[in-house]
Amino acid sequence: MKKSLGARLFDVFNITLMLFICVTIVFPFVQQAVISISPPDESSEIGLHLYTLKPTFDSFKQIFATGSIWDAYYWTILRTVLGTILTVVVSAMLAYPLSKRYLLARKVWMGLIVFTMFFGGGLIPTYLLVKDLHMLNTVWALIIPGLCSAYNIVIIRNFFTSLPIEVEESAYMDGANDVTVFFKIVLPLSAPIIATVTLWSLVGQWNAWFDAMIYISNGEIKVLQILLRDVLNNAQDAALANIRGVENVDMSGQRYTAESVKAAILLVTTIPIIMVYPFLQKYFVKGIMIGAVKG
């Protein structure tokens, strides 16, 4: 069917708008990527950085030369994987009974959960609780305190409520028990909301650094964000020393600036988690929409 002039103009407007939005999203990453591989005289200039004729990877060498970068990757990946799996499993197991209308005092339980979305214990009581549980300087201090999110429970519970009850009743008639129904019937049907919560937890665990700064003091467990913050501070100190004309600053013969190191840090910390997003994106919109409006 031939489109009218108005429809064609509308398509042109939509395509132009989407291209503009894509450029605004991609441009900052291109800018930082170019700065990260630019020599000092270019990376320190103010303005747009869309290309460089003298690429150098000294900024990345400075980051990976710390020697402990791979240990930081290990602890970050460990807390991300463990934290994400436990968060999704615990949130789903709490949300499932709350989605059943026959649960005794269901509104009371939901009220208590929602209450925690507005009122919290605060930093000091939380720290003392973690300390009394002997979790300081362990990876569990980075996982357990944030294991259960009221927001995730509400979203998953709303999604479970939208599932047809006839499917579960058929499974019960075939002899399935509650555990079988939950893991073999409910969870497979809830892939969109599970993928959505998984993505939220992945991003949150990967980017988290404040809890590591509070609960880890012995330096044995140093996540990626904390290590890269230290690298950035060292690079800034060296750059400031050079600006002030201080001698004997060890730059190891490498050519980088604080700006190029910051740009390299941005790429090193964001690229791994960005690579995960395309695998979960197809579930993301469906999951959040159904979980948000049902129930």
Image (cartoon, rainbow, N blue to C red):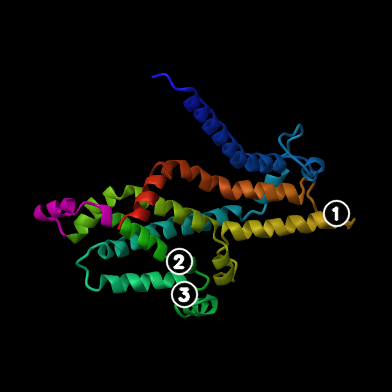
Q: Nearer the viewer, mark 3 or mark 1?
A: 3
Q: If you read the primary sequence from the N terminus, does the residue marked by circle 2 or circle 1 appear first?
A: 2
Alpha carbon separation for disc pair 3 and 1: 48 Å
Which residue is the site of mark 2?
A: 146
Q: Going 40% across and 54% down the picture, which residue do you hit?
A: 197
Q: If you read the primary sequence from the N terminus, does the residue marked by circle 3 or circle 1 appear first?
A: 3
Q: Going 56% across and 69% down the picture, which residue do you hit?
A: 216
Magenta residue span? 161-177
160 lies left or right of 18: left
Q: If you read the primary sequence from the N terminus, does the residue marked by circle 3 or circle 2 appear first?
A: 3
What percent of the width, then of the height, locates residue 169? 14, 54
**Residue type, numbered disc 1:** Asn
Point out the residue furthest to the top here.
Answer: 2
Q: Which of the image's four quarters has the N terminus?
A: top left
The answer to whether marks 3 and 1 mark residues whose Cβ atoms lie closer than 8 Å is: no
Number of numbered discs visible in the structure rendering: 3
Given residues 252 and 241, the one toward you in this image is 241
The label shown at residue 4 is none
63 lies left or right of 21: right
Tell me the element at label 2.
loop
Residue 99 falls in image quadrant: bottom left
The label shown at residue 119 is 3
Alpha carbon separation for disc pair 2 and 1: 42 Å
What percent of the width, then of the height, locates residue 189? 27, 48
**Residue type, numbered disc 2:** Gly
Q: Can residue 60 be seen in this view?
A: yes
Tell me the element at label 3.
loop
Given residues 66 and 289, the one toward you in this image is 289
Q: Going 70% across and 56% down the picture, which residue do you hit?
A: 232
Which residue is the site of mark 1?
A: 242
Magenta-span inclusion, residue 92: no
The answer to whether marks 2 and 1 mark residues whose Cβ atoms lie closer than 8 Å is: no
